[in-house]
Amino acid sequence: MMQDETKLRSNYLQMKKLSFFIILFSLGYCAGAQRTARKTGDTTRPGTVVVTSAFKPTLRNQAKINFNAGNPLPDTARPTLRYNIPAQNLFFVYQPAPLKPLALFIDTALYWKNANYIKAGYGNYTTPYLQAGFSFGDGKKSVVNVHAFHTSSKGSLPFQQFSKTNADVVGVFTDPQNEWSGKIYLDNRTQYLYGYRPDTLKFTKEQLLKRYTDIGVNAGLRNKTINSFGLSYQPTIQMNVFNDNLNGRESDFVLDAPVTKTIGSLFAFNLRLKADFTKYITDSVRISNNLFSLSPSFQFNTPNFKVNAGFSPNWDNKIFKLLPNFTAEVKLNEEKFVLQAGWVGNYLKNNYKNLSEFNPFIAQPKQLLNTRETEQYAGFKGSAGSHFTYNAKVSYLSFSNHPLFVNDTLTGRNFLVVYEPSMKAIRLHGEVGYTVQEKFSFAGGATFTQYSNLEVYKKAYGLLPLELNGSLRWQVLKDLSVKSDVFFWDGPQYRNKQLQSQKQKAALDLNAGVEFSILPKFNFWVNFNNILNNRYQRWNQYEVLGFNVVGGVVYSF
């Protein structure tokens, strides 16, 4: 093995020497060739080496993406900007709810725009007019309003005079979950029984005096948002004491507690408890008139369909009656047209206070019966455009113990309250309205009622068969507004001394008014009432005042 390695090393050295001699020989041959070429004039190869540039190894430039943005094209045209701004109108489609928002009347705008105001005036028929309002609170967590009013008039007929005085304090207080409200009020009304016939009879002023005084308090609570149990509630209580100048006294207590339980997004359960207790005392009678009702119902609501189905058990002075409570609404044409139908029943409480507000010339009632009313109706409502609204309904009604008003058979100065045990009626009712923000509003309505099938009395004495009314409010300028009202009704039936039925004449009453600024905080106002000077009679033998005008100023601060 060692011999082989020695032999290989010897061969390697010999080959290395041989390669060295070959290289030396080649270099010598090249040098001789160059010298021979220069001697013979060969110019194919220069004698010197010219270095044109130093070798520097580099990489070839690669193509890159250009990230520089190009210049924008010149703007040679102004762009057209289009905005879709909805009409700024106070527009509300009528909904049968306890609270119906409407456009604010112009003549009461000062009460809302200013915290305090005093309105005073005077007119013919010896008519003083005084009204005042004051507001307190921050408007967010508490608001307290104080309001007072007084007016009186003395007509051309003997003892044709009346006066009205009232005052109230209303407060609303809120916390994050609930809203509390309360009211304390005093109402005094005075009039004289000047409608006696013949007018040659002699009465003292004290014998004809009718004075009503009402003192009451209300309190309520409602949650502003549905709570975690899905409940919405709004209980209220009301207490009042009502007196007249003939030893008549009535006390009333009302508890009303509606509750709504939402079930998902489509269903709701409603429950309403109402208790109304009345005690009425005069020199000759003592009456307890109590009404208790419970109204459960289910609601199904979708964007285009709403139905309420339930019933209402009622106890009218311990007499039980079950009344229906079914309503349905179908919305068509993107909620601009709504079909409505229903079959509902309820009780109307008849107490001394309510009856005297409807007819101030009544004698002290000898009995108090509550009216049971059942209505089956169908109709439609909706809007046309952004300003016009309408509502129409036809109803078939059934009444039990409906109050009627007849003159006494001696002088006719008092109206006796009598009750019709059973009566039917067909009623047509329509409403239209046009509103443009708070600058212009018009509302009109018509109600036609045909009473029939009376069991005891021949006619529906004292009830109007046809009523038409209209109201216009127009703010012409910022500091100038006008208003107008018109009333028309067909004459109701009355009973004469011979117990025969007769019909009163139709009546038309047109009113107008204007208010404008005369100083920064002073406005001047004037109202024209019964412009046509119609001496009509709403109640038989009681003629109203003729044309009268009342004007004055309003100070706001």
Image (tube, rainbow, N blue to C red):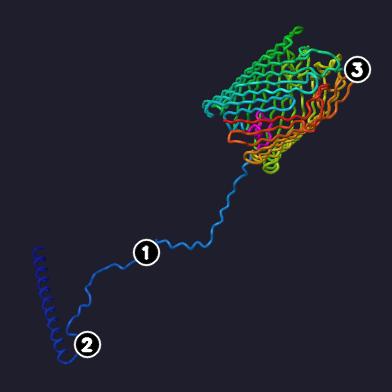
1 or 3: mark nearer the eye: 3
Task: Tell me how far mark 3 sits from mark 2, CA to CA.
Answer: 161 Å
What's the amino acid at mark 3? Gln
From the image, tell me which residue sits under label 2.
44
Within 10 Å of disc 2 (Cα), the crowding (few <14, some 14-19, many 20+) is: few
Residue most toward the top? 283
Could you tell me residue 305's position as x and y percent?
68, 36
Q: Main secondary structure of the magenta part?
A: loop
What's the amino acid at mark 2? Thr
Q: Decide if residue 429 is in sight here.
A: no
What's the amino acid at mark 1? Lys
Q: Classify mark 1: helix, strand or loop.
A: loop
Could you tell me residue 325's position as x and y percent?
72, 25
Within 10 Å of disc 3 (Cα), the crowding (few <14, some 14-19, many 20+) is: few
Q: Is residue 44 left or right of residue 94?
A: left
Within 10 Å of disc 1 (Cα), the crowding (few <14, some 14-19, many 20+) is: few
- Compare residues 371 and 515 and report the one nearer the observer: 515
Q: Quadrant of residue 361?
A: top right
Task: Tell me how far mark 1 sits from mark 2, CA to CA.
Answer: 45 Å
From the image, tell me which residue sits under label 1.
64
Q: Which mark sits nearer the N-terminus, 1 or 2?
A: 2
